[in-house]
Amino acid sequence: MKKIALPLLLIVQALHGVYAQEQTPVENATPKVEIKGSAAMDIRRNDTATKIVVTQEEILKNGDTSIGEVLKRLPGITLDGVQGRGGNIRMRGLGSGYTSIMLNGEPAPPGFSLDSLTPDMIERIEVMRAATAEFSTQAIAGGINIVLKKAISTAQTEIKAGLQSDNGQPGASVNLQMSDRKGPWSYSIGGGFLHGDFDRPSHTVTEAGGSAPLLRRGEATSEGYFRNFNLAPRINYTIKPGDVITSQSFIAVNRFRAHNTERISTVHGQEPMFSSLDQDIKADMELFRTDLSWARPLADGAKLDMKAGLNYNHRNVGAPNLQTGTQVERKRSVTSESTDKGFTTTGKYSSPIVPGHALATGWDIGYSKRDEDRIQREEYLRAPAGIAPQNLDEVYSADVTRLAAYAQDEWNVTERWSVYFGLRWEGVNIKSTGTDYGSIDNNSSVLSPLFQTLYKLGDKKKDQVRFGLTRTYKAPGVGDLIPRRFTSNNNSSTSPDMMGNPNLKPELAWGLDLAFEHYLGEGGGLLSASTYARRIEDITRRRVDLIDGVWVSRPVNAGTANTYGIELEAKLPLRSIMKEAPGVEMRANLTRSWSKLDTVPGPNNRLDQQVPVSGTVGADWKLDKLPLTLGGSYSYQGGGEVRISDRQYAYSVPKRALDLYGLWKFTPKTQLRLSASNMLRQDNLAQSSYVEATGRRSDTTITPTSVLFRAMLEMKL
């Protein structure tokens, strides 16, 4: 914690000094030319709705190959999972659907993974801390909008070729960006290919005390490779200025192969049914999405934006394995094939009927159909009498319909004060049938009033305050509703079977956001302090129960949760203080979050294993006498114990990561980027515990990590 707090405090202190100097009038001062910040900073500064905009330059700066690596450095955003390997995105420490992930302003299609995108395909990332009516209000923690590249006015071709090494395993990538304009037509095509081998060992310790003591040690390995291909073509046709028809598509093809092994030795206590596992995984995925949009100006300054899209996602997974124990030896083959297909349509009508008001109304409709088959076949080579193979043919389908309508008004009350009002109704219906459960018909809807305001202080308007009041929600997902059971190899309280709950209700939340921002006049410096609070009703958590002698984990609605926190952010170009300083830009952010679930006894009854503290400190140095830029960042993500229920506990180790990069420009069009991520190589540790009648049982998994080295040659033709 001190490692984060000290650099942040130094930056804050320096900014405070600059702020104090600006407030003191200086007689006979020499007039200065104000250098405006970046367009992204201007959007953040002037938009009534609170928003962080990450430009393409910032996205590509560290040589990352996945979006998760980019996002982890932003204020309030963390990743779960093992360091350096991506993971689910969390805003303000909250995961499990509390963060809305959007692609070009629409909810990400079913089966979509951010790993399908390469940073080169992205024009900008918008991080919205408070909901607005134009986008889905299924964003209790906030929303992240990934905007793909658009066509530009000049012809350009850019090629990037790279090599990487992860734990001694090689990898390679190639990215291509092309764009041009001819008359009313313009286009851009972005694509990339990434191949990587991996070798990922881990070991697990299972312990139990009380009347049934137990100690087991497990060694696991996962070796294989992945191949990702993606393509994003975009075509624009300009009928007349402001009247544009756009076609944008996204195609992703992923291939994953792995051979997994696990060996368990029992030091003390009862042996598991299976102590050895050999498994081969073959996973193929294809994703296609296409949108056709029309932006059309109307009379009296009005404008109509319409969009219609189709999406298709197909997955095919095979996992044959051999499991061996003292008395049992079994061959099992599991194949799963799923298909998601659907459409979306959105529209927005905006009109400046009243001076100073930006009035808009719109709709958002989406439909998705999911079909999945899971076929399981078993053969026992050795088994005690009475044990029979369990052959399953599980087939299910689900239809998800989403309807939304909204109205909003951004009102510039005065030159200093702007106000945003929004109202959005959004409903979700999920229908599902399966061979091993009855039909499900789940409805959820919410009417969300939304309010945000911005007020600029002082004559220079460099200080401003923000306030927001929002109503958001989280609808249960298809996987959480379907009561199919997914079995674990060795069922226990810490490794239970998983199944859904068709009786889940949506989670509803009221939210408050308050922020103060101070902008430096030169170089785009910023000092920001914000706080937030959310009260969430009908919170969903997973509960483990012993049912007919089998441990099962199910999601349940469990009371009310309160979560709140503070976020600090600082950006400081040194030349905004001293003209003769090196071309160094320092940045830091710190987020501290708290939460409490009223149906779980404390201490540590945090919501959804919420990350209590996270922060990043970094710097970029652009040398004046050499065509060289150096930079790096240090990230910290807190951990600790979380009490999930009266009997369930989870623990995660605090995570630390150091990333470095260097960029050498040979010519204005040719440059070499070198990077190293996860330089600290910290082992990841995660623990799951359950208090049984005989005593407390825990599984502790330790996963070594490695440094990922990359070299990327970038050329513009």
Image (spheres, helix red, strand yellow):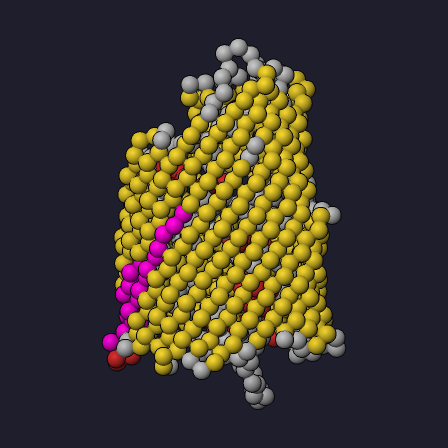
The residue shown at (64%, 46%) is 225
Seen from the viewer's position, the closer of residues 81 and 313 is 313
Res. 311 image quadrant: bottom left
Q: Is residue 622 visible?
A: no
Q: Residue at x 33, y 54 (%)?
A: 366
Give me the residue at 26% from left, 80% from top: 300
Give whichever of 31, 713 is nearer the camera: 713
Image-based side of 365 in relation to 629, left or right: left
Front-lying residue, 511 or 171: 171
Taking the magenta stretch, the answer to whether it contains residue 544 is no
Side (left or right) of 701 relative to 476: right
344 in the magenta segment: yes
- The secondary structure that dominates the magenta segment is strand
Q: Quadrant of residue 392?
A: top left
Magenta-drawn segment: 340-364
Residue depicted at 64% across the width and 25% down the height: 276
Of residues 324 and 141, which is closer to you in this image?
A: 324
Q: Is residue 93 above or below residue 495?
A: below
Task: Give residue 600's position: percent from left, percent from top.
Answer: 43, 33
Q: Quadrant of the C terminus?
A: bottom right
Q: Give coordinates of residue 61: x percent, y percent.
A: 62, 65
Q: Which residue ends up furthest to the top in the rendered image?
A: 385
In percent of width and height, residue 168 lies at 74, 48
Report the number of numbered marks: 0
Percent from the top left, x then y, of residue 81?
57, 43
Q: Is residue 64 left or right of 512 when viewed as pictured?
A: right
Asked whether residue 670 is in view, the answer is yes
